[in-house]
Amino acid sequence: MRATRRRPRNPGSRAPVVIREGDLMTPLELPDAVATLFASPPPDDCPVQRAIDQIADKWKLRILLALSRDGVVRFRELQRRLDGVSQKVLTSALRELERDGLVTRTAYAEIPPRVEYRASERCASLLPILAQLQEWASRG
Amino acid sequence: MRATRRRPRNPGSRAPVVIREGDLMTPLELPDAVATLFASPPPDDCPVQRAIDQIADKWKLRILLALSRDGVVRFRELQRRLDGVSQKVLTSALRELERDGLVTRTAYAEIPPRVEYRASERCASLLPILAQLQEWASRG
DNA sequence: CCGAATCCTACAGGATACTG
DNA sequence: CAGTATCCTGTAGGATTCGG
């Protein structure tokens, strides 16, 4: 952990925070590591929002975990492991994950067709963050 | 989120990793730090999914960032800063965030009424993870 | 086996009016 | 000001059918 910088009550130190008189609580401590969160472009181009949007639907997270755990998985087998997902939804989820660089799709021109999905390196680099998120969720 | 119950699959003991012969790629390297991701209960009780659900809608992330940055913010002022949010949606988002322990709501029995929102400590502990997510998103 | 095409429902999110 | 109460629309997700 890094040194927590306690904000003193005296005025004069840079005050980006609105405090009314008689206010009992100070704002949260904001370590430097999170400063970039507030420097990002305000509206819709927030990278955090984009990242969340890339994994926040009903199935994507489970898809990524299944592929990361099992390596190479074919479409039908993946659908079987994700109990209850419809083929249409799984297809579109995989398409988006592929577009976002989180999974790799490999199709073989065979009969019957064979399509393999695997997690990408980009997905692998996301897993430690998800693990932290898991730890965070378990705390509360 | 409506999931139709299907018959539970019970394939017996299965090798955790399926590798076909002639496969060129090995599964991703999985550091120990992410092992807990695959040990969690499979279906709907995944803590990661819960965490994501708590912040993955159109406004929650911006609400949390605004409150974390500005400290104490009243309802109307918050709505002004989140350009375009309707009060119904803002209200329900704040209710959920409060229920999940991410924001604190303080109402004063005055006329006109005054209600203050602030980010919780639990929210503060989430920010570093969001910062990492931001860094991750910037990499791809 | 791997989808694409179609149809359908539930719900998130928005617009507006009204209240204490 | 800080909400509720309605009404409305777009879309995520599911069921089913068809095709290469």
Image (cartoon, coloured by chain):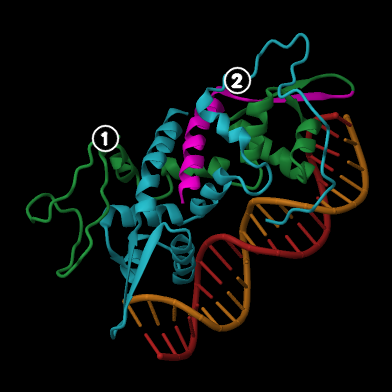
Chain colours: A green, B cyan, C red, D orange
Magenta stretch? A112-140
Circle on res. B28: 2
Drawn side of residue B59 relative to residue B18, left or right? left
Q: Secondary structure at mark 2?
A: loop
Check the residue under mark 2 and report the chain it is in. B
At 74% across and 24% down in the image, what residue appears? A116
Which secondary structure, mark 1?
loop
Is B82 colored magenta in this rendering?
no
Query: Considering depth in this image, is A114 or B37 the residue closer to the camera?
Result: B37
Local packing at callout 1 (Cα closer than 10 Å; few below 14, some 14-19, many 20+) is few
Q: Quadrant of the N terminus of chain B?
A: bottom right
Observer able to see residue A135: yes
Mark 2 vs mark 1: tell me if same chain. Answer: no
Q: Is residue D9 above or below residue B130?
A: below
Q: Residue at position x 69%, y 25% from top?
A: A70
Chain of the residue displaying label 1: A
Q: Tell me the chief SS of the magenta region.
A: helix
Q: Position of residue A1 (x, y in %)?
A: 30, 34
Q: Residue A132: within the magenta?
A: yes
Identify whether A137 is placed above or below B117: above
Residue A51 visible here = no
Q: Nearer the viewer, mark 2 or mark 1?
A: 1
Report the residue marked by disc 1: A2
Q: Amino acid at mark 1?
A: Arg
Residue B77: x and y in percent read 31, 67
- Sort mark 2 into few (<14), some (14-19) or many (20+) by Cα contacts within 10 Å: some
Picture residue at 36% right of the left edge, 40% below the top = B128
Q: Could you tell me the amino acid type at mark 2?
A: Leu
Q: Is residue A49 above or below residue A114?
A: below
- Seen in the image, is B63 located left or right of residue A79? left
Q: Quadrant of residue A88?
A: top right
Query: What is the C-alpha distance between the residues marked 2 and 1?
Result: 31 Å
